[in-house]
Image: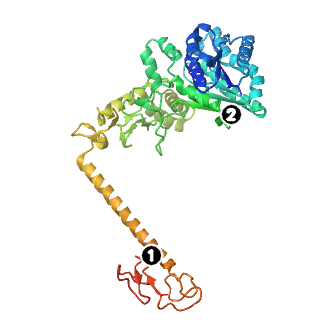
Amino acid sequence: MAEPVALVTGAGGGIGGAAARRFARGGWRVAASDREAGSLAGLGEELGAALVATPTADLRRVDACRAMVEAAVAAGGRLDCLVNAAGLWTEGPAELTREEDFDRVLDVNLKGLFFLSAAAIPHLEKTGGSIVNLSSDAGLQGNTGAAVYCASKGAVSNLTRALALELAPRGMRVNAVCPGDVDTPMLRGQADSSPDPKAYLERLLAGYPQQRHARFLRADEVAELIFYLAQPAAAGITGANLSIDFGLSAGIRSSGRKKGADSPARCYHRGRLGGEMPAIEFTDNVEDLSTDQGFQFKFRCERCGDGFMSSFQTNTIGVAGSLLRGAGSLLGGIFGQAASGAYEVQRASGGAQHDAALRAAVDEVKPLFRKCRRCGDWLCEQTCWNRTAQMCKRCAPIAEEEESSIRAEHVRTQVANDLLLEENRRMSAKGKQAAAECPDCGVPTLGKKFCPGCGKKLAGAAAFCGECGAKLSPDAKFCGDCGAKQGEA
């Protein structure tokens, strides 16, 4: 049976190239495609005999998409997987988007992907093959300033579901991989087009739940998931949009909501959600307890969970709103409406006063946190800091606390061992009792004075202590070894 064949588009780029290499390492033959033949030159040298074709095409043209599929099938003799990895990125304010930019992104990211898949279906049906689309975390959630790209990838994600349902009765599978930011030439190009490339990348990483430990994905990590989805082991997966983004699309990082608070907790991480909130380097666990009367925040230590409250700061807009509401309750009409409108506008936008209050709270509470010079973690000085060593207690444990902890652990271990020995002794005693047999009928006597089988008195039979298992005389009332009182028959 000939080796399976994968057609990988966008193979001249980071993820597409990594996918082509992974299929080749897995024993597949590969048809690697890109718009320009020059971008595939290096890949040809790497893949060697595994590379069966390098068709080039402008994916904005339907006839070119169909020709690419036919070229791959002609060279490989079959088609087992189509990897739609080709794609374009664009960003910028929606009102400044040009029609040609919109068309270019949608034509490549969506139109080309659709017609490539349509052309591949008859060939994939013969092999029971699959399609793996490259969507994005932007296909699952909105990204500020990238409306066109999000529209294209959101369409890819839902197209994946629809095609999966359509093709399942014919033995084919369709899935999408949804990566976060991947360290590829496309990402570096995005950064280079911004005024400050370093700040651009740092802003992206600031949105990840790994916080200071965040990093970008590697193309080979995404390729590994793509390759798996094409294997028989993934037969149960179809119609799935699989996230591989370090949890970026899992939800908004937040410490929840305090009971009785008038406003929900808000998460202050920068990056994809935009905004110019102050940087909070010592924790990512912040509760916004602000109300219409004022601002207050709780900052939690990420190691022990202790919370540190900022001082209450009066909200002048909220106080004015209260006065208006008071007037509204007496006079009605526009006063009450104005009060509600003023505060709701501020809540919706964050408000300059709210942001200033948060900055002041950060400056107030930050001195209560320390950064360990060994592990680099920020933590609270009150609970997690060794003042003598000027490091965190994990890196420099306090001797007295460590000794106390070790002693406590020793006591717990000793108690557990004693309980285990006692249980073993009890089980042993029960076993010995069960082992004693009636000399006439052979039924186990279970330590009784009369045989449970024949009823004969067992006055001369041996007995065993129910606590320690020691051998006793039949009429013994107490165990000579452990002193335990023996039960009546």
Which numbered disc, 1 or 2, marks the residue that appears first in the sequence? 2
Q: Quadrant of residue 69?
A: top right
Q: In this view, does 165 lie to the left or right of 436?
A: right
Is residue 141 visible to the viewer in this orientation of the structure?
A: no
**Tag 1 residue:** 429
Mark 2 element type: loop
Q: In this view, does 71 lie to the left or right of 341?
A: right
Instruction: Tell me what residue is drawn at x 63 percent, y 10 percent.
Output: 35
Tell me the crowding category of disc 2: few under 14, some 14 to 19, or many 20 or more residues within 10 angstroms, Cα based: many
**Tag 2 residue:** 238
Instruction: Tell me what residue is drawn at x 72 percent, y 21 percent.
Output: 117
> Distance between the Cα atoms at labels 1 and 2?
59 Å
Instruction: Tell me what residue is drawn at x 68 percent, y 13 percent.
Output: 59
Looking at the rendered structure, the kind of residue marked 1 is Ala
Front of the two marks 1 and 2: 1
Residue 176 in picture, x, y percent from top left: 64, 28
